[in-house]
Amino acid sequence: MAALRPLIAGNWKMFGRRSDLAEIEKLAADAREVAVDVLICPPYPLIGAALAVGAGAGVLIGAQDCSAVAADAARTGEVSAEMLADIGATHVIVGHSERRSQHGESDALVRRKAEAALSAGLIPIVCVGETLAQRDAGKTEEVIAAQVRASAPAEAGIVIAYEPVWAIGGDRTPSVEEIADVHGIVRETLSVAVRVLYGGSVGPKNAAEIFTSPAVDGALVGRASLKAADFALIVRAYPAVT
Ligand code: PGA
């Protein structure tokens, strides 16, 4: 089986206005010149317009969440994976730690969302990660294996993002060795071909170092994905495939 292409994904979270779509346009040269998939996940209201800009720039567009119900249904305020696929989105993030902690999303719900994404033809990016208390208690491997088992369908081609909760939105990251260890656990747990991304305070300054590990198939980037100048440096930091 051909190796899966690395993926550098930007999660805009609840940031962005129409004027920010120009940032996607500015990624055109970078997206074309690298051997990685470049993805931006804007908030729902911008996805349609982002798709139009992304198509011209060679940038894939995804969503930050989807309903666990794949097909049309009476679910006020929800957006289905089929709707996202219908407009041309390719990926959807599910189980981000902010959804898990701020919206009480369980592993079981995250798994249903990932399955809904797959049934609609989208690639789910399933997020997992330990808290600082769990890491300090030496439970990281156990927690990650349990989250992966319970929230990620064992389907080849899906994406897992390892995002330690304590590394998101701050300035600390695990060491490259610690990241590689956890990515190894993810692969052992699923035993199908998946891409494993690292996420949590990835920026232009530390991306190249994080990407030195062959266990890292790319990154899920929050803050540093909002400005093309920063995100392009991360995209270009991924080692060229020879
Ligand atoms: P950050 O966010 O890059 O701003 O730390 C990462 C994420 O939450 O996906």
Image (cartoon, grey):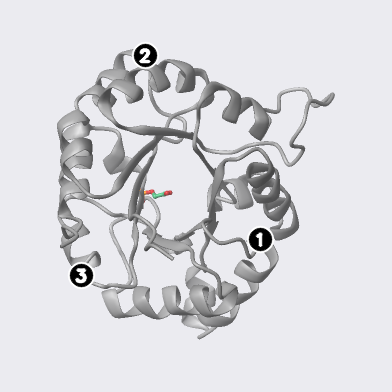
Closer to the camera: disc 2 or disc 1? 1
Residue that numbered label 1 is attached to: 153
Give the secondary structure at mark 2: helix
* Residue at disc 1, CB closer than 8 Å to ligand 1: no
The reply to whether residue 206 is in sight is no
Among the two numbered marks 2 and 1 on one chain, the one whose residue lies closer to the N terminus: 2
- Real-space CA distance between mark 3 and mark 1, rounded to the nearest whole angstrom: 28 Å
The reply to whether residue 156 is in sight is yes
- Judge the density around disc 3: few (<14), some (14-19), many (≥20) Cα neighbours within 10 Å: few
- Judge the density around disc 1: few (<14), some (14-19), many (≥20) Cα neighbours within 10 Å: some
Give the secondary structure at mark 1: loop
* Residue at disc 3, CB closer than 8 Å to ligand 1: no
Q: Position of residue 214 (x, y in %)?
A: 28, 72
* Residue at disc 2, CB closer than 8 Å to ligand 1: no
The vertical placement of 121 against 72, above or below, is below
At x 38% / y 17%, what residue is drawn? 52
- Judge the density around disc 2: few (<14), some (14-19), many (≥20) Cα neighbours within 10 Å: few
Q: Amino acid at mark 2?
A: Arg
Q: Amino acid at mark 1?
A: Pro
Give the secondary structure at mark 3: loop
At x 34% / y 23%, what residue is drawn? 55
Among the two numbered marks 3 and 1 on one chain, the one whose residue lies closer to the N terminus: 1
Residue that numbered label 3 is attached to: 212
Q: Position of residue 8 (x, y in %)?
A: 32, 48
The vertical placement of 159 against 122, above or below, is below
Q: Position of residue 92 (x, y in %)?
A: 54, 41
Horizontally, is 174 left or right of 193 in the view?
left
